[in-house]
Image (cartoon, grey):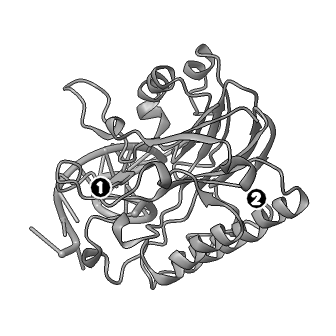
Amino acid sequence: MRLATWNVNSIRTRVDRVVDWLGRADVDVLAMQETKCTDAQFPTMPFAALGYEVAHVGLNQWNGVAIASRVGLENIEVGFEGQPTWSGKPDVEAAAEARALGATCGGVRVWSLYVPNGRTLEDPHYRYKLEWLAALRDTAAGWLRDDPALPIALVGDWNIAPQDDDVWDITAFEGRTHVSEAERAAFDAMTEAQFTDVVRPFTPGPGVYTYWDYTRLAFQKRRGMRIDFILGSPALAERVTHAEIVKDERRPGKKGSIAPSDHAPVLVELADG
DNA sequence: ATGACATCCTGTGGATGA
């Protein structure tokens, strides 16, 4: 099975590009983040035409996560147990955002995750990010307690660069989110809970990234960040035969073609379970 | 660089991203 994750930065803008890649890359399951649309707005038809079922949760123009699968899509779960809530405004009641979606595809429990950005170290959103990661760790650890042999893939945009080599220049990130000790500890806690990065062994750094800022010619200058990850439970990790970051999909296209997302897809191949 | 770029909205500038 070929399983991928991709922060698409608006599915309505990029759907043709995404489904084109699905076909070319022979992907069985694709987790998407930042679809930036409601469920009603999600363009399911192009996926269906290629034989993919789609599950999506999107409440408004922000966030939004989806899973497209051509190997089954069962037990769809919107949000994880204990997922922290958020409200951007004092007069709006806090609610769970569209940042987590689970489904079982071809026997693998897949979670499409869009971890909160954090904004700045002083922002309430940063506290929310850390709480979100802690809750995810606790809940995911529970899944493995219930069934240690379950193949689980926690995939998506983690908005954390776990190592200094995961950003183009660590000195440019001093005092900023994505590289703080607390965020890295939260990411490492996933590993301690037995969910390991199954892509890094196939794509060692330095200079290996999954995201490049749209501004300042970041891609051309090789100024990126490794922030999109596929974490696997032990039963998932032992089946990984190949992994890659599909940097080609971040490359600026020809004139007239659909512009790339600022993230590249991350892909793993799994042996039959 | 309160910047640049890109995406969204019952838009025409603000929120969000990292």
Instruction: Check disc 1 and report the residue beneath it.
Output: A213
Across and down, in percent, residue A188 comes to: 58, 73
Return the disc, 1 or 2, that comes first in the chain's sequence: 2
The answer to whether tags 1 and 2 share a subunit is: yes
Identify the residue position indicated by label 2 in the image.
A80
- A7 lies above or below A256: below
Q: Residue at x 56, y 28 (%)?
A: A27
Depth check: give the residue in front, A190 or A273.
A273
Q: Splitting the image into 4 quarters, where does residue A47 fall?
A: top right
The span from disc 1 to disc 2 (Cα, nearest Å) is 29 Å
Residue under the image location 75 percent in, 49 percent down: A235
Q: Position of residue A241 (x, y in %)?
A: 58, 39
- Label 2: which secondary element: loop
Using the rendered view, name the quadrant where residue A84 is placed: bottom right
Looking at the rendered structure, the kind of residue marked 1 is: Asp
Work out which residue is located at the far right of the displayed protein and give it. A146
Percent coordinates x, y for residue B1 in the rendering: 18, 75
Give residue A87's position: percent from left, percent from top: 61, 69
Front in this rendered view, residue A85 or A236: A236
- Residue A72 is left or right of residue A117, and the answer is right
